Structures are given as structure tokens and as C-alpha cells.
Image (cartoon, rainbow, N blue to C red):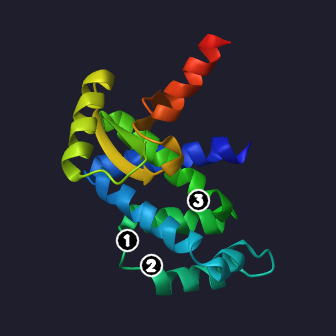
Amino acid sequence: MSDIVVAKRYARALFEVANDKGIISQVEEELKSVASAIRDNADLQKFLNHPNIGNTVKTDLLKQIFEGKVSEPVWNTLLVLIDKGRQAIFSVLVSDYVKIANEALGQASATIYSAFTLTEAQQAEIASHFSKVTGKTIRVATVVEPKLLGGIQVRIGDRLYDGSLAGKLDRLSKALV
């Protein structure tokens, strides 16, 4: 079975447990912080993925770092991944969990790309607009992208809404050719 399918199954199982306990959002935040801690520490990544280091040694290190700082479902998921030798799929599991949680909660994550920094009010206005378009509550993250020249691009899932000046110039150029 491919790692993508396995990660999705683990994410679904974790979501079911979190849903039963009423801690869907808490688990999502904990998963993101654990993934960030692992991603930002190259030595920890190497250690966890090293085939010659035993699972008990890996588990002991994770206990020192995360035990008591994450909920029981997240901790148990980490232990199962280490036990099964599937720690490499953790980042995919996190992204799958976020997708499942967003769908269940009627939420969507949007990334707003703009040529300049947006104010909180502008972000809220954009989130409100796209909430009406998608019928979901929108959670936004912003990225400053100077090459857009002006306007914004909004990515929600696989969909890109391009209202940037660069995008409009590109579409105009194609129309003229």
C-alpha cells in the first residue's frame, strides 16, 4: 500500500478519535506544531528516519520532547507511526488531517498572495467574500509576492482565483495573440 493511502487512513482514524473527544481543532494545532518542530530540526529528522536506531530509542526521545505537551490521540499516533516504521509519512498525515477536519467543520484554508502586506480588515473582507463563494468558513494565510505587481491571488485547495495585475496582463496578452 502506498504511503499516501496509509497516511490518509491514519489521518481518518485520528480524526474519528478527535471528533469523539471533541478536540478536532486542538489536535490540528498540535499536529502542526509537532510537524513544524520535526521539519525545523534536521538532526531530529535524521534521527527519526535512521534505520539503525531502534524504535524504543526514538520513542524515548519523543517522550522527552512531546509527552505532556500534546493530547493523547496525537501522542498515540506518534507512537504507532514509530512502532510501524512509518514516521516519514507524518507530514502527509498532518495535511490529510487538516483536509478532513476542514471538510467536516465546513471550513477551507485559503492562501492570499498579494504584492503588499494586507491589513487584518482586508484579510477579513477577502475571507468574507470567498466564504460566500465557497459556502465555507475561510481561514486565511497571507504571502507577500511582489511579482504580482498589484491585486491578489487566492488559492483555496486546488483552485486559484487570480485577480492580480500580472494575471490580468497575461490574460490580455493571450487574448491579443
Mark pair 3, 1: CA separation: 15 Å
Query: x and y percent of residue 65 in the render?
Result: 48, 83
> Around disc 2, counting alpha carbons within 10 Å, would you say few (fewer than 14), some (14 to 19), or many (20 or more)?
some
Does the image show residue 130? Answer: yes
Query: x and y percent of residue 147 in the render?
Result: 54, 46
Helix, strand or loop status at disc 3: helix
Q: Are marks 3 and 2 in contact (CB under 8 Å)?
A: no
Query: x and y percent of residue 133 in the render?
Result: 30, 22
Q: Amino acid at mark 2?
A: Phe
Mark pair 2, 1: CA separation: 6 Å
- Residue that mark 3 sits on: 90
Picture residue at 43% right of the left edge, 47% below the top: 115
Asked if residue 162 is positioned above or below residue 43 in the image, the reply reads above
Helix, strand or loop status at disc 1: loop
Residue extending farthest to the front is 176
Helix, strand or loop status at disc 2: helix
**In front of the other: 102 or 123:** 123
Q: Are marks 3 and 1 in contact (CB under 8 Å)?
A: no
Residue extending farthest to the left is 121
Q: Amino acid at mark 1?
A: Val
Mark pair 3, 2: CA separation: 15 Å
- Residue that mark 1 sits on: 70
Picture residue at 62% right of the left edge, 12% below the top: 176
Picture residue at 30% right of the left edge, 59% below the top: 26
**In front of the other: 165 or 57:** 165
Q: Are marks 2 and 1 in contact (CB under 8 Å)?
A: yes
Q: Amino acid at mark 3?
A: Phe
**In front of the other: 56 or 114:** 114
- Residue that mark 2 sits on: 66
Picture residue at 60% right of the left edge, 63% below the top: 81
Q: Quadrant of the N terminus?
A: top right
